[in-house]
Amino acid sequence: MPTYIVLLGPPGAGKGTQAKMLVEKFGLPHISSGDIFRENLKNGTELGKVAQTYMTKGELVPDDVTIAMIHQRFARPDCTPGAILDGFPRTPAQADALEMMLRDFGGHVNIVPFVTAPVDVLIERLTGRWTCKANGHIFHEKFNPPQKAGICDQDGSELYQRDDDKSETVTRRIEVYFQQTMPLVEYYKEHNLLFEIDGDKPIEEVSAQLMGALQK
Ligand code: ADP
Ligand code: ADP
């Protein structure tokens, strides 16, 4: 049976950072909807153009577009053993669509680690985030600085600050999270899949909580 782990939580909680750790431990692919949109944006695809208009405002890309994109990603053979989902689903409609998709692959969501942190922490993390151009590796100028400023430790590529990590957009993204994504907390709680993780701890401590949850 394939294994599907859904990382849930507000922007800046540390989902991407933890997903990269889980990939190394479990050897499952990391499916980040935000990364796929940014890749399309970089390559100037139609999907990228559509997504950009929403992303720059901090709004969600419409469900039909997002669901179709994830569906395509699941069709790739590396997803056969399962996946670590980061940033998808973000709405109840996406969660329903995910269940249907996974049924087709003979699986279902196995666990939903819900990573949280207070809003002021989220803002400080997002506005200090530096992302690697080549592969999306994640750093923070204060909490997880690269060895050499502006350069990715893992692949030597340039680091940049995402447009949507500017403070006006960050505020909107957090609002959108509370309005549109929070209902999923109840949804997965009802399905007995939710596992709360205190994201307001150093990266290694959050990883340890997560590993504890996943080993159960
Ligand atoms: P998300 O994917 O949930 O938006 P990220 O993993 O990209 O979050 O993390 C947001 C920012 O916070 C990044 O700059 C990252 O380096 C930093 N960060 C992640 N986890 C922690 C943590 N536990 N403590 C301090 N900073 C963190
Ligand atoms: P974060 O690191 O803050 O969690 P992401 O990289 O996951 O941000 O997402 C960046 C942007 O991409 C979102 O603000 C939204 O515009 C778009 N996006 C990503 N995932 C989804 C999704 N599942 N549904 C709709 N829009 C999405």
Image (tube, rainbow, N blue to C red):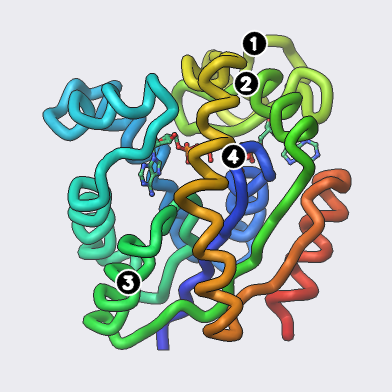
The Cα–Cα distance between marks 2 and 1, rounded to whole angstroms, is 8 Å
The Cα–Cα distance between marks 3 and 2, rounded to whole angstroms, is 33 Å
Left or right: residue 99 compared with residue 28: left
Residue denoted by label 3 = 96
Residue denoted by label 2 = 130
**Residue flagged by tag 3: what amino acid is it?**
Asp
Towards the viewer: 128 or 181: 181
Q: Is residue 84 above or below residue 200?
A: below
In this view, the residue farthest toward the front is 179
**Residue flagged by tag 4: what amino acid is it?**
Pro
Q: Earlier in the sequence, mark 2 or mark 4?
A: 4
Q: Earlier in the sequence, mark 1 or mark 3?
A: 3
Residue denoted by label 4 = 11
Secondary structure found at label 1: loop
Ligand 1 near label 2 (Cβ, under 8 Å)? yes
Q: Do tag 2 and tag 1 residues touch (Cβ < 8 Å)? A: yes
**Snapshot quadrant of residue 143:** top right
Q: Earlier in the sequence, mark 4 or mark 1?
A: 4
Image coords of residue 82 (percent x, y): 42, 72
Secondary structure found at label 3: helix
